Image (cartoon, grey):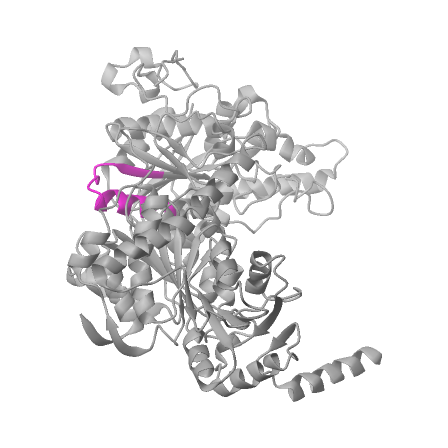
Amino acid sequence: MRSQIEGSRAIAQAIARCRPQVVPAYPITPQTHIVEALGAMVKSGALAGCEFITVESEFAAMSAAIGASAAGARAYTATASQGLLYMAEALFNASGLGLPIVMTVANRAIGAPINIWNDQSDSMSMRDCGWVQLYAQDNQDAVALHVIAFRLAQELSVPVMVCVDGFVLTHAVEAIDVPGAEIVDAFLPPMSARQRVDPSDPVAIGAMVGPEAFTEVRFLTDADLRRAAHVFPAQASEYLRLSGYHVGEVSKYRLDTASTVVVTLGSVSGTVREALDDMDGDIGLLTLTMYRPFPAAVVRSALAHASQVIVLERAFSPGAPEGPVTADVRTALAGTGADIKTVVAGLGGRAVTRSALHAMLATALAGELPAVSFLDLRADVVERELARREAGVAT
Amino acid sequence: MTIQEVKFYQVGSRAVGNRLLSEDLRTEQANENRTNALNSGHRACQGCGEALAARYVLDTAMDAADGQLAVVNATGCLEVFSTPYPESSWQVPWLHSLFANAASVASGLAAGLRTSGRGDVRVLAQGGDGGTVDIGLACLSGMFERNDDVFYVCYDNEAYMNTGVQRSGATPPAARTATTEAVGPEPGNRFGIGKDLPRIAMAHEIPYVATATVAELHDLEAKVRHAMSLRGARYLHVLVPCPLGWGSAPADTVRIARLAQRSGLFPLFEAEHGTVTSVVPIRGRVPVEEYLRLQRRYAHLFAAAGDADRQAATLRAVQAIADRNIARYAIPVEEL
């Protein structure tokens, strides 16, 4: 039913309809409203058969999710930013053990300097942790992606991270259609685990694996993750049939013949669409919903006509030749001759405005966009500081 | 499950041989139908106190839980020597995640079992002193304060043995480790540092805290059974000599553990909800020197080339710790 609701509350309602059994929770802005809502539902009895554990850290939250998932229970938690980094070790462990945990990341910058506002540096820094990564463009996407995430995780025995831009989505109150229990129950089968801790069939989970088998174990874990590229679209189709809402692994806007294409992830996609609508240029937009596994074939086919590709990065990769998404897009487009650029945008909550996008795109259409640039960078500030450092080094 | 020949042990000067006891008073280790939770063939060192203690604890816990037990293991010696893939010595359902998170994984496992309709399965978490008192302390304290239904067992060999004998927060004063070498003006581990986890656990006022050693099998098993009879957060701290790290003879593991208790350096007690409820008397008290001399980690205290005055002062300081333990827990001292 469509109603005016905060993004976090809508996500919490969707998760509740997926009937999680264990929700370990630790507060961190801007994720907190989601677990607060779930905690209230467990406490009131509205979310029956679920235990809500108020743990002492994000590391403990993911660890408790690991234990719950190893018991064969449906486990969910949410985090952001520093919290995601604090649970990094456990993230790799959860995927290595093949545990179907679902987690929301309310995307937020990483300090220092400490900053609570939105960018995607947190989840991007964990892109190699072996989890499926799905990025929501809007809250309707976010709701659908969480429901699909539970089924994807369960079917592949792989953990799934649903990335939702902090504040921009989590705190936005808008009309959202949260799927009813009848839709979710028809879509998502009851929890069944591939392997679990069970005295009637005792197994040792988490053995030490040496050089003779480690590579093969990692290869097979990756094979499970990569299956998501095929399974996700099939599940999304079924979700569409049941709910009437479609979310694909990528979404395309004015893309068919565009020679210049913006590639991005998450909520900034909406602003880019509006910026493109304002312009006459031959520019399209490709938004990646699935980032891990990287849908390289889909990206390559979608960008077949593009001669210039501008990757609008919501994260920053210090010291790297370009942004993290740019590197993946470049690999997908190898041999096509497309000119691929990084534009770092919206770090630490800086608004990505239509006017800034217009200026950047005009530069691009003029063939003058550098290989790597920062949208709306205050050049006077950085140049002054760089000059001072130069002087400092000299003395 | 593999059938394995069960070996029987008789230990100690005042320990009553199992054969002399009625069947219901015998130890679980004397039960030929025991689980043998940690099967032979694992790769622990000769004389490993931790391997001994893990089998004692888990066999008893399995019996107390009627076989409905799941075990979470922190990274460490016990994890490494028991499960080199594709082998496993565990005869229990066993889960290893990370070094620091055994207590949290156990909390989640217990919740997951309850919400999956298998609340009858009991959860036991175990780790070494590094995984318990140092890197895992935050998770353990969280499990304690929430009073989660987990029985946590620490096998304390007083240093990071798996990585090559480095100091932990449980390393005693004067002990040589790879990071507290027996050199300089204060050889070995410094005095006045380290933490006493049983007392930290008691401060959480959890239902049950106890200490045990591998030398007192009846006592250890009774404490495991009592812990298993309770619900909520429970903690058992077992002293497990490590021949490799302590520089002791493998055959002396049980003897050294007994001397730790008889010297007063390792008090055996139980506490419920933060209050001490029982203390094991010391039968035949020995000076700490008798305990220390069997271990090369303390060799610098007895070296002929050492500064005799300083050695004597260090021995007095260690003796003072034992004296304070005996006073703190009001341990009755009985003549042998």
Q: Is residue A72 magenta?
A: no
Whether residue B9 is situated above or below residue A225 in the rendered picture: above
Identify the image quadrant of the C terminus of chain B: top left
Q: Residue at x 22, y 65 (%)?
A: A40
Toward which corner of the image does residue A378 lie, by quadrant? bottom right
Q: Quadrant of residue A236?
A: bottom left
Which x, y percent locates residue A283? 51, 76
Magenta segment includes B107 = yes
**A114 to the left or right of B68:** right
Indicate the position of residue A290 as horizontal and vertical percent values.
43, 59
Give the vertical position of A202 relative to A306 (above or below). above
Task: Give the magenta-colored segment's residue range.
Answer: B104-124
Q: Is residue B36 left or right of residue B272?
A: right
Residue drawn at (35%, 47%) of the image: A100
Front-lying residue, A43 or A71: A71
Q: In front here: A178 or A33?
A: A178
Q: Is residue A218 visible?
A: yes
